[in-house]
Image (tube, rainbow, N blue to C red):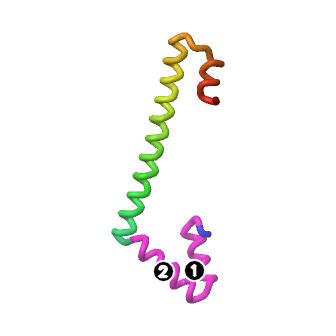
Amino acid sequence: MAETDEELEAIAKGGGAEMGEAVKQMRYLAGTSEFLYMETLRELARLDEGQKLSNAEQRGALQVLNLLESGRTPDEIRRMYTS
């Protein structure tokens, strides 16, 4: 799998006419507004997922802090979450 334009060009040249045509079509499709829109949606979904995970971690940390402030010991808290 090519990770750079140079590698992609080498594949296109070394793979014969069919591979050259496939690379040409891939480059064409990657430049279309539909493809760019889908890439934007994928990136937004990844960012949203990361934000949700971060928020969940923060909520979990706050719950643990609240339990510690209420007098629970770390061992009690650990048993609550692992039992």
Q: Residue at x 48, y 37 (%)?
A: 54
- Where is residue 64? Give x, y as percent: 53, 22
Is 29 within the magenta?
yes
Residue under circle 1? Answer: 12
Amino acid type of the residue that numbered disc 1 sits on in the rendered structure:
Ala
Q: Residue at x 43, y 54 (%)?
A: 43
Q: Nearer the viewer, residue 83 or 41?
A: 83
Q: Residues within 10 Å of mark 1 (few under 14, many from 20)?
A: some
Q: Residues within 10 Å of mark 2 (few under 14, many from 20)?
A: few
Q: From what the image shows, is residue 61 above or below residue 37?
A: above
Q: Nearer the viewer, residue 72 or 7?
A: 72
Region in magenta: 3-31
Task: Tell me which corner region of the image, top left, top right, bottom left or bottom right, holds residue 32.
Answer: bottom left
- Where is residue 78? Give x, y as percent: 63, 24
Residue under circle 2? Answer: 24
Q: From what the image shows, is residue 14 above or below residue 52?
A: below
Kindly indicate whether the residue at mark 1 contacts the one at mark 2 (C-beta within 8 angstroms): yes
Amino acid type of the residue that numbered disc 2 sits on in the rendered structure:
Lys
- Where is residue 27? Give x, y as percent: 46, 75
Quadrant (top left/top right/bottom left/bottom right) for the N terminus? bottom right
Task: Tell me which corner region of the image, top left, top right, bottom left or bottom right, holds residue 2.
Answer: bottom right
